[in-house]
Image: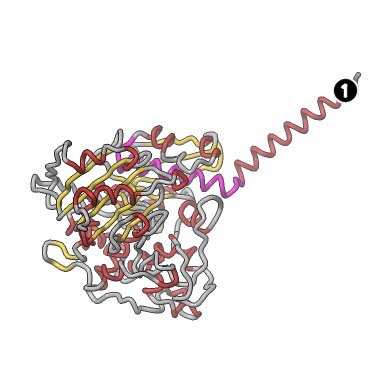
Amino acid sequence: MRWISKVVRGAVIILLLVIVGAVAWLALAPPALLRIGDGYAAKIVCSNVFIAGRDAATVLAQDVQAPGNPALKLIRVSVDREEGIVTARILGLFAPNYAVYRGALGCVSVPDGDIRAAHSPPMLEETSVAESDEPWPDGGHVGVDADDPVSSLLKNKDLAGPAMRAVVVVKDGRIVGEAYGDGFSAETPLIGWSMTKTVNAAIIGRLMLAGRMSFDDQDLLPQWHNDQRNRIRLSDLLGMESGLAFNEDYGSVTDVTRMLFLSPDMASLPAAAKQTSPPGTHFNYSTGTAVLLSRIWMNRFANKTAAIAFPHDALFAPLGMTSAVLETDEDGTFVGGSYLYATARDWARFGQFLLQDGVWHGQRLLPEGFVGAMRTPTPTSNGIYTQVQAWLSGPGGSNRQFGLPEDTFWMTGHDGQTIAIVPSANVVVVRLGLTPGHLGYRPQLLVKKVLDVLAPVKT
């Protein structure tokens, strides 16, 4: 029976060698997908802990698990509150990735692990502005009765949707209803995901009003000077019609996941993208395009310090969006496609600003026609996307399908973030949550019920 013993010993040795090899592989050269998962976890936990004041374990259990990938359950995070560093590792051991808190600039992904470099770009001075007791939007006073028709409507969980975190309804410039999910309040900053794209576009609009940019600008990046990409216009990028290749699939290792969680300089990936079709001939929704837009408008400043201060000085401060935190990548470029945190009331301020055609307190902050372009479809998108980083349809169907006014336009973001702007009814509806698309939630149903109460159609 010695041969059996030898076989068993040989099998054990082989198994140990396989385990040692696997551990060495995971330690020295972890797969990109694992590093992306850890980068995602580190960034989400960091922003929610340090900006929103939430519990790290809760964020890991809820927000990080939202995509549903079973590998995410293996991630462990550690939070160094004193240094503002969040580290995420598979099984607490492998494929480490990092995020660092930088005060008024929120959190930054640090995929290269260079924590010191993460602090090297110019920082934004932190300001603390207490809201006055004036009525919203000029102050923080919101006199909504819980028994008001809209407030009663928002108690309907089917209308508010799964894992709703905040709903704010504005009529004629005043909040007439709001509701918050368990653990969230009017003071909780919440991520807008791709609603950030529309805000980033408004920042460009501020520069347009000052005569520093225009829709027809070409030759937009130094690396495009000597090839056909120098013919791409700013308007092509704003309408997602640049012709640049970019894979927006979040389910694996793709352009968008590499950019967000593996690249210290996020703009470098879409800036190097090949042009696969002539500008203005093909629609390709791309978060990489939004990051490029950030890089392009920031390049209009003589130095990065002035560029980093611009969103606050030119947009957030005038609108009273005191909670707004727009985050950058490690290189200091704003992640203009994804990473804006703000309270629901501040998101509502921005929606009201667009409802008022880019005018605030009688002062025009966006060029005439700019918001109109946000409401004008691009032919290449089959009429669902607009010329300036907004949508003419909400998730899953057109306005007409849900009985909404034809002039309704939308800001939308990952996991159920929406702002519906209805000029004809003078209504804005903000809905924020953690509601993955596979759940099939349709915010149009909520908006329709709100309009039925506030602005019923006369027949």
State the residue in front, 37 or 420.
420
State the residue in front, 439 or 315.
439
Q: Is residue 268 left or right of residue 123?
A: right
Q: Is residue 51 magenta?
A: yes
Q: Quadrant of residue 399?
A: bottom left
Q: Is residue 309 left or right of residue 81?
A: left
Relative image position of residue 284 (x, y in whole percent): 47, 66
Relative image position of residue 100 (x, y in whole percent): 38, 46
Q: How many marks?
A: 1
Which residues lie in the magenta part? 29-54
Q: Which residue ends up furthest to the front in the rendered image?
A: 459
Q: Is residue 156 left or right of residue 15?
A: left
Relative image position of residue 432 (x, y in whole percent): 32, 46
Quadrant location of the C terminus in the rendered image: bottom left
In this picture, is 148 found above or below 361? above
Relative image position of residue 25 (x, y in whole percent): 65, 43
Q: Is residue 33 magenta?
A: yes
What residue is at 74 percent from the left and 32 percent from the top?
A: 15
User: From where the camera sits, is residue 388 visible?
Assistant: yes
Q: Main secondary structure of the magenta part?
A: helix
Q: Secondary structure at mark 1?
A: helix
Tell me how the rendering is colored: secondary structure
Q: Which residue ends up furthest to the top in the rendered image?
A: 1
| Category of crowding for the residue at label 1, using alpha-carbon neighbours closer than 10 angstroms: few (below 14), some (14–19), many (at least 20) | few
Residue receiving disc 1: 4
What residue is at 51 percent from the left and 39 percent from the top?
A: 72
| Residue type at tag 1 | Ile
Quadrant location of the N terminus in the rendered image: top right
Q: Quadrant of residue 155?
A: top left
